[in-house]
Image (cartoon, grey):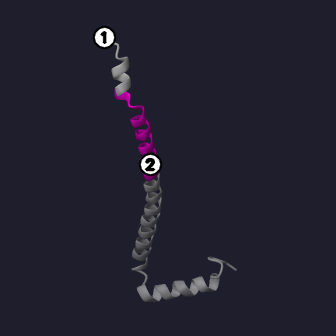
């Protein structure tokens, strides 16, 4: 006996396929399968892209932390104090 989703067995799958064939006809089934495949692909891409968005948020947060650290160091004052091109007083 074939088990598809745990509670759907082989006979249930056959009945579902017969009902789909009767409702849509043989010529329409390839179009339906194509649309279903396209929808699944778009869903998968959307879920993959959500992970990218989360990664970008994490990177932006880390960049803010780095900027904050650099601002605390105040590189302008360091360069003014240690500039070898500036004549000493």
Of labels 2 and 1, the one closer to you: 1
> Callout 2: 10 Å neighbours few (<14), some, many (20+)?
few
Q: Main secondary structure of the magenta part?
A: helix
> Callout 1: 10 Å neighbours few (<14), some, many (20+)?
few
- Residue in the foreground of this view, choosing between 57 and 83: 83
The residue under label 1 is: 89
Q: Is residue 87 above or below residue 52?
A: above
Q: Residue at x 47, y 50 (%)?
A: 58
Quarter holding the N terminus? bottom right
Q: Tell me the number on the disc at residue 6.
A: none
The range drawn in magenta is: 56-76
Q: Position of residue 8 (x, y in %)?
A: 62, 82
Q: CA distance from mark 2 to mark 1?
A: 43 Å
> Is 8 displayed left or right of 86 in the figure?
right
Q: Secondary structure at mark 1?
A: loop
Q: Tell me the number on the disc at residue 61.
A: 2
Quarter holding the C terminus? top left
Which residue is at the far front?
Answer: 89
Q: Is residue 82 magenta?
A: no
Q: Is residue 61 above or below residue 72?
A: below
């Amino acid at each position: 006996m074939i088990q598809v989703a745990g509670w759907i067995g082989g006979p249930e799958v056959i009945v579902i396929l017969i009902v789909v064939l009767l409702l849509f006809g043989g010529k329409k089934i390839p179009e339906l399968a194509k649309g279903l495949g396209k929808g699944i692909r778009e869903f998968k891409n959307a879920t993959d892209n959500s992970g990218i968005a989360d990664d970008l948020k994490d990177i932006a947060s880390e960049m803010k932390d780095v900027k904050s650290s650099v601002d605390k160091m105040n590189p302008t004052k360091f360069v003014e104090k240690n500039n070898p091109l500036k004549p000493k007083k």
